[in-house]
Image (tube, helix red, strand yellow):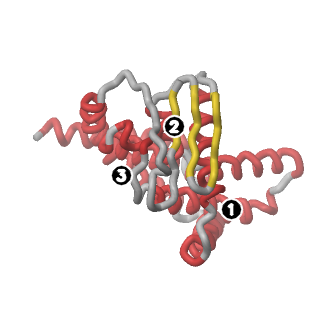
């Protein structure tokens, strides 16, 4: 049985040790992280191509950036809604546990921190909250259901605004809690965690932007990622 969590106040780890059973030693994960670095560079280059391809989607970008700006004002001027963030963080641990065939034994989320006790765990379960924007996914699912049931096409700008706010919520509060020691991160090794979180967040953008803007296909975006990663490997081979 494993335990994931530990999203504390900005000043402490909530006094709670987090237990992980992982069959892969950290030195092995460090080697894997180094080997994945070309994929990181490829993802950045591919994202640049996606941004250029979707830059003309004004209806999307105006609403999306407007939503992100609204949340940024809230983030900077008002008390941070840590209970909402911690609940989403721990629920993401739980969802990825279920997705990978495990069971959730215990769930706790408060404004001071939280944890999830599961029957199994791996690096995806442990690190998922740092790259999987749960509230964005819930917003998309809610709109998709509403659109199929009631034809919400006229509300699409509001949907894009909410997606922007939800994504900014994910980015800002994830960065906020990463300013303190997180047992999720230390348990997996700092370099390995950084690479997986970086790849996960870029992967979300590479998949999400094509789907939301319809200016480039998902397969094209993934193809660019593979192409750019291959180009990086070729340059390294020539060295």
Indicate the secondary structure of the residue bearing disc 3.
helix
Query: Residue 26's x, y, as percent?
Result: 29, 32
Query: Mark 2 or mark 3, which is nearer to you?
Result: 2
Q: Looking at the image, do the residues carrying marks 2 and 1 touch, with CB atoms under 8 Å apart?
A: no
Determine the CA span between mark 1 and mark 3: 27 Å
Above or below: residue 176 compared with residue 207? below
Query: Residue 1's x, y, as percent?
Result: 53, 24
Going from N to C along the chain, the mark reached first, 1 or 3, is 3
- Is residue 51 among what the camera can see? no
Q: Which residue is mark 3?
A: 45
Depth check: give the residue in front, 153 or 125: 125
Q: Which mark is residue 4?
A: 2
Tell me which residue sits at (56%, 51%) in the image.
113
Q: Residues within 10 Å of mark 1 (few under 14, many from 20)?
A: many
- Is residue 105 among what the camera can see? yes
Depth check: give the residue in front, 148 or 52: 148
Above or below: residue 35 compared with residue 205? above
Is residue 149 shown left or right of residue 161? right
Is residue 77 shown left or right of residue 16? right
């Amino acid at each position: 049985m494993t335990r994931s969590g530990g999203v504390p106040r900005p000043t402490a780890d909530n006094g709670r040790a987090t237990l992980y059973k992982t069959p892969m030693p950290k030195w092995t994960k460090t080697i894997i992280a180094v080997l994945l670095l070309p994929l990181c560079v490829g993802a950045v280059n591919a994202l640049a191509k996606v941004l250029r391809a979707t830059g003309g989607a004004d209806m999307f970008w105006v609403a999306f950036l407007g939503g992100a700006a609204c949340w940024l004002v809230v983030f900077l001027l008002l008390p941070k809604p840590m209970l909402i963030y911690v609940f989403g963080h721990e629920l993401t641990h739980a969802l990825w546990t279920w997705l990978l065939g495990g069971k959730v034994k215990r769930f706790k989320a408060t404004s001071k921190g939280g944890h999830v006790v599961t029957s199994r765990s791996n690096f995806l379960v442990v690190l998922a909250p740092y790259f999987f924007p749960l509230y964005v996914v819930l917003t998309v699912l809610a709109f998709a259901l509403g659109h199929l049931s009631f034809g919400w096409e006229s509300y699409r700008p509001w949907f894009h605004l909410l997606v922007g706010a939800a994504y900014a919520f994910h980015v800002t509060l994830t960065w906020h809690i990463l300013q303190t020691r997180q047992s999720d991160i230390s348990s997996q090794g700092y370099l390995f965690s950084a690479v997986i979180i970086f790849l996960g967040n870029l992967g979300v953008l590479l998949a999400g932007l094509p789907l939301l803007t319809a200016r480039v296909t998902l397969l094209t975006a993934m193809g660019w990622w593979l192409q750019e990663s291959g180009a990086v490997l070729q340059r390294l081979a020539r060295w």
